Amino acid sequence: MLKRCFVVFLLMLVFVSIPSISFSATILLKNGQKIDGDFVGASADEIQFEVASQILKIKVQAISYIAFDKSIPTKLNASNGDHFKSDREKVLRSLKALKSVVEVGVNYDDFSQRVLDTQVKIDEYLSKYKKAGYPSFNTAVSNSMGFYAAARSAWELRLMETDLAGEWLRKGEMLCQNRYIQACSALKNRLDTENSEPSVILAAYGIYDLWECAGDSLLKAEKEL
């Protein structure tokens, strides 16, 4: 039993060093519960295990053993970890560049194009590392990009001709359903408490509140590295 635990420990060390690889595995907890899923990453005190598209974080001390399936390669390419690290740093730089631009000052056309360009890079990264061992990092990066994209929509609303009152108001009401506008607490609080039409609030405060939320998510992503 001690030998088996030692082997499992060595396997975990290998996978920690190569977070961009995931494998099917079975975990037996010390309480007798068995969990089947995909091993996607680990830290010093917990592993990350995907079950039914949900990421579970399981404490190492709660695990009796881990059994990996036969699809595990006998030779692992250590360069995969280096590529993953490099790609994470690239998406962070892209978001940081966008943050720097809005802090210095930017017009709508420049901001809009930068959002679209950055969105392509984020989408490529998330598609490539959908099952990477850093789900919290991926979520934070995705949220930061989402807030910037929502800010772009809020800016579009501000630029609409307000003499088209009916269309402008409908646009604002539809925009309120955006998941990132709902997730930006400062803006959501304004929409819930202020006695004004959603379009008025979004046009007046949406851009800046969403930029702040994007920056907060970017900070969370940096802390996850």
Image (cartoon, grey):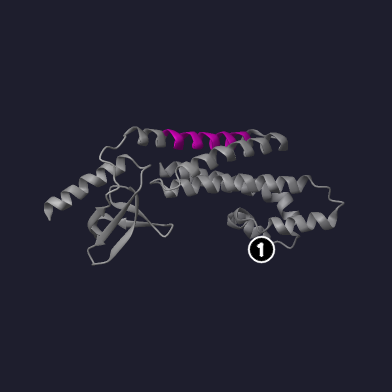
Position of residue 9 measured from the top left corner of the image (x, y, whole percent)? 21, 48
The image quadrant that residue 59 belongs to is bottom left
Q: State yes or no: residue 89 in magenta.
A: yes
> Quick one: quadrant of the N terminus?
bottom left
Circle 1 residue = 192
Q: Which amino acid does label 1 sit on?
A: Asp
Q: State yes or no: residue 222 in magenta.
A: no
Looking at the picture, tell me which residue is in the foreground, 144 or 120.
120
196 relative to 217 in the view: left or right: right
The kind of secondary structure element at disc 1 is: helix
Position of residue 141 measured from the top left corner of the image (x, y, whole percent)? 51, 44
Residue extending farthest front: 70
146 relative to 67 in the view: left or right: right
Residue extending farthest left: 2
201, above or below 219, in the image = below
**What's the magenta region?**
86-101
25, above or below 132, in the image = below
Looking at the picture, tell me which residue is in the foreground, 166 or 39.
39
